[in-house]
Image (cartoon, helix red, strand yellow):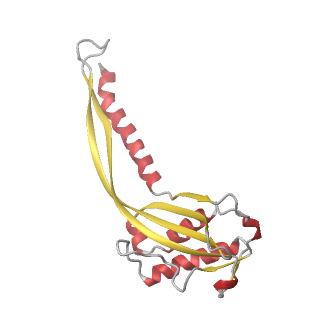
Amino acid sequence: MKPLSRWPYLTRTIAFIAWAGLVGACATISTGSHYDETNNFGLYKTFSWIDENPYINDVSAIRVDPLTQSKIQNAIQNQLEQKGYSFLEDRANADFVLAYTVGTRESIRISSYPTGYRGTWGWHVGGSHYYVHEYTQHSYTEGTLSIDIFDGNTKKPVWHGWAEKSITESDRKDPSSVIKEGVAKLLESFPR
C-alpha cells in the first residue's frame, strides 16, 4: 500500500503547478481589437489627439491621476511614432485622431482541485472511491486600457483596441512599465 501514501503529495504538487500556471497567466497582458474593414489604413501618415484631453471619462469611471494620463499619452505617442506615424499638434490636419479610456473591475477567481484519494484500490465498488476537493478564492483587480481611433476627415470610428491585465501591487506603485508594455501589445494589431 505504499503507492497510496504518494497520492496526497502528487495531487498537492499537481495543484501547486496548476496554481502557479494560473498566477503566471494572470500576470500577462491580453489584447484584442476590431476595425472597419472598408477603411484604407495605408493612407494614414499623421495622427493627433481627439481633444486637449484625450482621456474619455464618465461619472462612473475610474479616476486617473494626471501623471498616469501623461504616461499613457506618451506611451501611445511613442509607439505610433515607432510605427512610422508623425504626430501633429494641429488635429484638424491629422489623418487620424485618437482617444483612450481606462477602467478597472474587481473579480474573484475560485479554484477547485482534489486533495487526496480515499478508499481502497481496485475497481470502483459501491462508492468506495472518492476525492476530497479543496476550494481556494483569490480576489484581484482587472485593469483595462482601450484606445479608439477616428478618421481625421470623416470623424468616424475606424479602430478600437484594448489591453487587460490583473493589476499587481507593483503596478499600482509604478505603472510605467505595464503602461508601456500594454500599449505596445495593444497597438501591434493596428493595421497598416
2, above or below 97, in the image: above
At horizontal 56% and vertical 69% (from top left) the residue drawn is 148
54 to the left or right of 166: right
> At which x and y percent is residue 49?
59, 80
> At which x and y percent is residue 190?
65, 63
> At which x and y percent is residue 161?
56, 63
116 to the left or right of 155: left
- Between 143 and 41, the one nearer to me in the picture: 41
43 to the left or right of 132: right
- Between 104 and 173, the one nearer to me in the picture: 104
Q: Which residue in the rendered view is the most extreme toward the right?
A: 43
133, above or below 177, in the image: above
- Between 10 and 23, the one nearer to me in the picture: 23
| Residue 2 placement: quadrant | top left
> At which x and y percent is residue 64?
41, 77
At horizontal 48% and vertical 79% (from top left) the residue drawn is 69
